[in-house]
Image (cartoon, rainbow, N blue to C red):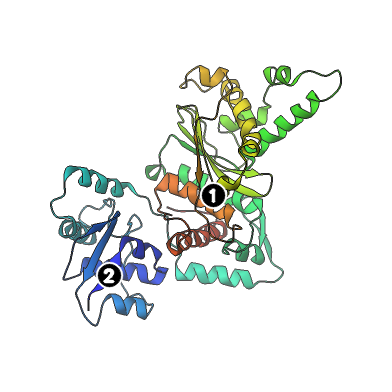
């Protein structure tokens, strides 16, 4: 009987099966092409063996290999151009797509640049599980101390994360960005969780001073505000830990913003456009006044930080000398029904923005599976102290 395989299904399969499926796709004898809502349907007409063996037996044949850069079977060309697997995949693409119109061809070419995050192997997953069973173990990783219980929480969709989990993962993302520049846009910067916290802390302090009798007005305090050396060094790429990169020539800043310790959102700052996009799982239910109160510190103080750093020369003067206005996008971010997975979904959205990782459609098992797989990738990255692409 024919087996229905889609790009989305390949992405949701568990780790031991993925390589087997890719190999089966390459060796499929009967290929039928169809395109429905950006999905590619591949029918394998081989009966009694192949994909059903790989999935049902949950095993992986010896010698099966994995192409890290694959998204389904659309791959970026490996450095070794003579790779037989690469050639087989290219032949499969020709069978599937045939002679495509130019517009569709351009859309397909975009997939060649998808950078898929590295999947967790069975060995790595078992190591994490053993770590979770440890009772009185607590070890220091890059930035924080974590116990086995912490790793159990990191791989759960039903438990609220501590800020330190998010901060550690953001640190690993920055390190990965710096260590593997060929995978990522050099004009992107991934910021700390405390990036927003520093803005809010200083803004709240000025608001408090403005209410003091006989003190300066809030407008006067804003006009005279000077960032401290720590934040200036932040823009210059000087940090007390690995992963610091200066903002010279930067076009896009990506951060996770903790709003009142109740939920987290992803913040995308487009420096060349003077615009910010905010993606959050509760944005539609939040009062606009509450949101703008939360984001106002960034609007008021970001231009001052950029100008006072002394290294930002590539932006229009108005973005350095005037407070920003919200001209961006408020978008509902995907999330699961529990709402407690808000931190991991915020991180997943950063992965989506920098690697084109598909986490749509929202509120579906496909989406939850993608984010849950990322949780294991991040936890493994913390344990191994490295987050590889």
Q: Is residue 162 left or right of residue 93?
A: right
User: Which residue is nearer to you in this view: 273 or 361?
Assistant: 361
* Outermost residue, left side: 99
User: Which residue is nearer to you in this view: 58 or 381?
Assistant: 58
Above or below, 207 relative to 291? above
Q: Residue at x 35, y 49 (%)?
A: 114
Cβ atoms under marks 1 and 2 closer than 8 Å: no
Q: Residue at x 59, y 61 (%)?
A: 338
Task: Inspect this view and state whether residue 34 appears.
Answer: yes
Above or below, 216 relative to 128? above
Q: Residue at x 59, y 72 (%)?
A: 130
Above or below, 294 relative to 55? above
Q: Of label 1 and label 2, which has the lower sequence position? A: 2
In the rendered image, residue 71, in percent from the top left (x then y), is placed at 33, 57
Q: Secondary structure at mark 2?
A: strand
Which numbered disc covers residue 4?
2
**What is the CA distance from the residue labelled 1 to the residue labelled 2?**
32 Å
Which numbered disc covers residue 346?
1
Q: Badge 1 local density, few (<14 within 10 Å), some, or many (20+)?
A: many
In the rendered image, residue 366, in percent from the top left (x then y), is placed at 42, 62
């Amino acid at each position: 009987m024919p087996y229905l395989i889609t790009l989305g299904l390949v992405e949701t399969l568990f780790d031991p099966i993925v390589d087997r499926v890719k190999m089966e796709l390459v060796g499929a004898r009967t290929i039928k092409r169809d395109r429905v809502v950006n999905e590619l349907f591949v029918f394998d007409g081989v009966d009694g063996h192949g994909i059903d063996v790989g999935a049902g037996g949950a095993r992986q044949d010896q010698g099966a290999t994995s192409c890290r850069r694959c998204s389904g079977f659309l791959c970026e060309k490996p450095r070794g151009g003579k790779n037989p697997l690469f050639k087989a995949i290219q032949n499969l693409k020709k069978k599937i797509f045939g002679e495509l119109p130019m517009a569709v061809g351009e859309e397909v070419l975009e997939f060649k640049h998808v950078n898929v995050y590295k999947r967790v192997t069975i060995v790595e997953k078992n190591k994490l599980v053993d770590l979770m069973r440890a009772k009185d173990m607590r070890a220091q990783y890059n930035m924080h101390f974590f116990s086995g219980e912490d790793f159990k929480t990191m791989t759960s969709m039903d438990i609220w994360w501590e800020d330190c989990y998010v901060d550690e993962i953001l640190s690993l993302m920055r390190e990965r960005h710096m260590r593997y520049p060929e995978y990522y846009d050099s004009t992107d910067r991934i910021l700390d969780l405390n990036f927003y916290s520093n803005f809010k802390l200083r803004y709240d302090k000025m608001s408090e001073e403005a209410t003091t009798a006989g003190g300066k007005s809030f407008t006067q305090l804003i006009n005279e505000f000077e960032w401290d050396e720590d934040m200036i060094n932040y823009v210059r790429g000087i940090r007390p830990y690995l992963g610091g990169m200066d903002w010279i020539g930067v076009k896009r800043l990506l951060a996770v913003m903790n709003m009142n310790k109740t939920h987290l959102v992803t913040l995308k700052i487009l420096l060349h456009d003077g615009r910010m996009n905010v993606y959050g799982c509760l944005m539609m239910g939040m009062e606009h006044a509450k949101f703008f109160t939360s984001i106002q510190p960034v609007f008021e103080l970001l231009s001052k930080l950029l100008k006072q750093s002394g290294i930002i020369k590539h932006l229009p003067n108005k973005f350095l000398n005037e407070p920003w206005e919200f001209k961006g996008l408020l978008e509902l971010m995907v999330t699961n029904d529990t709402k407690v997975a808000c931190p991991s979904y915020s991180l997943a959205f950063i992965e989506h923005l920098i690697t084109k990782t598909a986490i749509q459609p929202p509120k579906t098992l496909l989406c939850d599976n993608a984010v849950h797989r990322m949780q294991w990738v991040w936890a493994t990255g913390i344990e191994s102290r490295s987050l590889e692409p």
